[in-house]
Amino acid sequence: MFLGQNFLKRAWRRVSSLNLWGISVHTTSKTNRWDKARALLAGGLVLGVGAAATLAAWTDNEWVFGGSGNGDGTEPNTPGTGIYRMQQNTWAGTAGAANWTDEPDANGGALTYTIAPELMVPGKTVYSPMQLRAVAGSEALDVSLAQGIQSQLNRGPDNSTDLYDALTYGVYRGVDKATCEAGTVAGAAVVVPEESALTAGSSTTFPLSAGDDANTAGAPVNLCFALTLPSGASATLQGLNTVPVWRFTSSVGQ
């Protein structure tokens, strides 16, 4: 009986260090319990140090904004954009007076010719003055005549493509109203050379100056259109009308 008890004790000690079918069998001793207690205490000390480090952190911030005043955007020296816009005068006011308007869409303002343009004959040129300027509050601008098209409205005898294709034109700068109406354009700065197709634009630019203050428009720039029915125009163009349209464009920046 004594031998059997000793055998069982030795067997149990061996089994305590084995893994049977994936199940660990072990015994618990006072030494193991003390090791676990020390591990838990060490973990608590580490956590305590971490908490103390977090509580000891101090921060300070400094904010700035781009501008001056109270930062609501109403003060000067805050980032923003200026005004860049022009307007036209086609002398369409009462009795040919100036009438400044903003016409960003086709057909825009109507040019006033020196004679009834519907009575043109081969070799005849008619003239029409106009002006451009920077609006009050606008910065200075660079302008070009960018495009010529035939109006899309009412195509037919009243807006003939054949007559549109036959006519030629030119544009001069620095010719005032009276001089333009008289057809005296010799020596003026050429924006578009005469005998150009009505579709022709120009890479030539000219400046529009800014006004003296935010309430004053810039100085007007005089322009003079010369519209010609060439001397060799076909007799089939008799009794027709057409509606040419031109677009001036101004630009700033890159």
Image (cartoon, grey):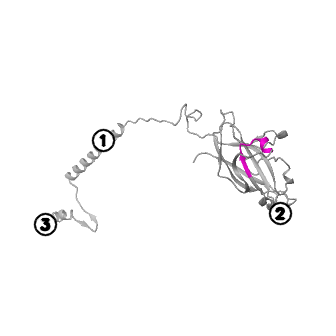
Residue 74 sits above or below residue 5 on the image: above
> Relative to 53, is 195 on the left or the right?
right
Residue at image position (81%, 50%) is 126
Give coordinates of residue 169: x percent, y percent: 75, 53
What numbered label is drawn on residue 234?
A: 2
- Contact check, label 2 and label 1, Cβ < 8 Å: no
Select label 2 or label 1 by which is in front. 2
- Which image quadrant is residue 78 in? top right
- The region drawn magenta spans 170-181
Quadrant location, the N terminus: bottom left
Disc 3 packing (10 Å; few <14; some 14–19; many ≥20):
few
Give coordinates of residue 139: x percent, y percent: 63, 39
> Relative to 77, is 150 on the left or the right?
right
Helix, strand or loop at mark 2: loop
Query: Could you tell me the amino acid type at mark 1?
Result: Val
Helix, strand or loop at mark 3: loop
Measure the C-alpha gap from mark 2 to mark 3.
141 Å
Residue at image position (65%, 45%) is 206
Give coordinates of residue 87: x percent, y percent: 72, 42
Helix, strand or loop at mark 1: helix
Disc 2 packing (10 Å; few <14; some 14–19; many ≥20):
few
- Which image quadrant is residue 77 in? top right
- Contact check, label 2 and label 3, Cβ < 8 Å: no
What numbered label is drawn on residue 120?
A: none
Magenta span has 52? no
Residue 7 sits above or below residue 105 on the image: below
What numbered label is drawn on residue 1?
A: 3
- Which image quadrant is residue 15 in? bottom left
Magenta span has 173? yes
Q: Residue furthest top?
A: 69
Where is mark 1, residue-wise? 49
